[in-house]
């Protein structure tokens, strides 16, 4: 919260920031074009800078097209110019090479860009009005497996990027207490389940999810020859009448509960409560925006919330711990361990039934 306790900009700086916001969609598209046309790569590969005519020849684009892109790139700090020769900046380098930046840009462009224009309607109606730009589903989760290949790829790359680096750090924490039967709710493509099976040869995983993700997970598990140690069950967790299977030592949910409203989170956790015995554990891995070390991480989480509002379902977000943790309490659990700053942005919560 300390990031946002004061307005630290001077008036001129604030007005400048306002112009960056006003032209935000423009600079996004220009940066993407400079990357996708290979212009940034051409400039970076030149030893002493490169003239525009040489860029045009290598990129096979008109002088006009290259010129307008580069002049915009100058103002946003992607390139510099000296003696009519262009060189790439540090920011341009990150646009070109940084995996986090590429994942975020592709996700915003391929998945979100058109749908975000329906944000105001989504706020008024409480429904994901931007979904119409992708398909006709109640939420995006029913439709991910049916999206065009390039959109699906950008969605999964974004979804996995923020959890994959946390898994190696979290696996020892989850399985150190002898968990042998684990229920994963919202297994997606099976990444956590596969990592678990490879980490502990004695564990058995049951995944609950929608039919589309389960189909992908089954295929990946079968390819690796792990099908004998994993079970699958189709479920719509929004249907409160559908209870969760019993007989598991622990329940695992990774970047799953942020896909739901506060009331829905509480409902899901109450069914976790009913499915576990007195010694059972619930593990929750979530990126809380008020548990971040760096302001830019919080910025990314705040902006990702708008995807949930306009496209995913209209009622969820990247939560603060302050908003999220009361849902755990309402469901009847105590948080017995909280570990922040795992991987890029994650917090691990270990929960037990209240005594």
Image (spheres, rainbow, N blue to C red):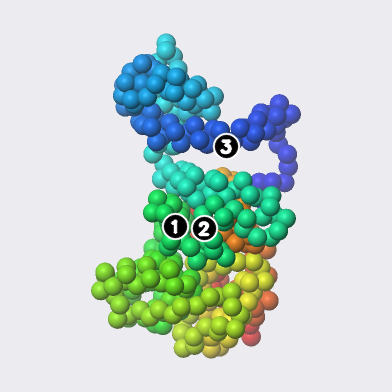
Earlier residue among tags 3 and 2: 3
Earlier residue among tags 1 and 3: 3
Label 3–label 2 contact, CB within 8 A: no
Return the residue nearer the eye: 130 or 21. 130
Q: Choose top left, top right, bottom left or bottom right for residue 229.
A: bottom left
Q: Is residue 266 left or right of residue 244?
A: right
Q: Choose top left, top right, bottom left or bottom right for residue 165.
A: bottom left
Determine whether 160 is above or below 235 in the image.
Answer: above
Determine whether 95 is above or below 126 in the image.
Answer: above
Label 1–label 2 contact, CB within 8 A: yes
Earlier residue among tags 1 and 2: 2
Q: Residue at x 47, y 47 (%)?
A: 110
Q: Residue at x 31, y 24 (%)?
A: 58
Can residue 244 be seen?
yes
Q: Which residue is mark 1?
A: 147
The location of residue 244, given as percent across then percent down, is 52, 83
Q: How many marks?
A: 3
Determine whether 167 is above or below 238 in the image.
Answer: above
The location of residue 170, given as percent across then percent down, is 44, 66
Return the residue nearer the eye: 190 or 198. 190
Q: Which mark is residue 25?
A: 3
Label 1–label 3 contact, CB within 8 A: no
Q: Is residue 266 left or right of residue 5?
A: left
Q: Residue at x 63, y 36 (%)?
A: 21
Q: CA distance from mark 1 to mark 3?
A: 24 Å
Q: CA distance from mark 3 to mark 2?
A: 23 Å
Can residue 43 be seen?
no
Q: Which residue is mark 2?
A: 135
The location of residue 162, given as percent across then percent down, is 47, 56
Determine whether 85 is above or below 298 in the image.
Answer: above
Determine the secondary structure under disc 3.
Answer: helix
């Amino acid at each position: 919260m300390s990031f946002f306790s004061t307005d630290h900009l001077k008036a001129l700086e604030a007005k400048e920031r306002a112009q960056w916001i006003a032209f935000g969609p423009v600079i996004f598209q220009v940066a993407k074009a400079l990357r996708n046309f290979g212009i940034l790569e051409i400039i970076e590969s030149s030893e002493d800078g490169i003239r525009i005519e040489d860029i045009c020849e290598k990129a096979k684009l008109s002088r006009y097209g290259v010129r307008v892109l580069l002049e915009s790139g100058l103002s946003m700090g992607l390139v510099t110019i000296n003696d009519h020769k262009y060189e790439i900046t540090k920011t341009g380098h990150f646009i070109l090479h940084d995996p986090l930046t590429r994942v975020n840009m592709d996700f915003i462009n391929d998945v979100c860009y058109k749908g975000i224009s329906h944000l105001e309607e989504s706020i008024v109606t409480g429904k994901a009005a931007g979904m119409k730009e992708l398909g006709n589903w109640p939420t995006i989760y029913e439709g991910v497996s049916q999206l065009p290949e390039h959109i699906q790829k950008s969605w999964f790359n974004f979804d996995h990027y923020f959890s994959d680096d946390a898994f190696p750090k979290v696996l020892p924490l989850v399985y150190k207490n002898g968990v042998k039967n684990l229920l994963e709710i919202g297994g997606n493509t099976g990444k956590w389940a596969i990592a678990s099976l490879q980490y502990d040869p004695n564990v058995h995983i049951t995944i609950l999810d929608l039919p589309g993700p389960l189909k992908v997970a089954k295929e990946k598990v079968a390819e690796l020859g792990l099908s004998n140690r994993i079970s699958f069950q189709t479920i719509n967790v929004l249907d409160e009448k559908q209870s969760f299977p019993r007989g598991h030592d622990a329940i695992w949910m990774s970047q799953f509960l942020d896909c739901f409203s506060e009331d829905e989170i509480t409902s899901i956790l109450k069914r976790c409560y009913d499915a576990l015995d007195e010694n059972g554990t619930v593990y929750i891995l979530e990126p809380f925006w008020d548990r971040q070390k760096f302001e830019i991480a919080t910025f990314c989480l705040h902006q990702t919330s708008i995807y949930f509002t306009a496209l995913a379902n209209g009622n969820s977000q990247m939560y603060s711990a302050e908003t999220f943790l009361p849902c755990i309490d309402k469901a009847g659990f105590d948080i017995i361990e909280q570990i922040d700053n795992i991987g890029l942005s994650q917090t691990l919560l270990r929960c037990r039934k209240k005594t």
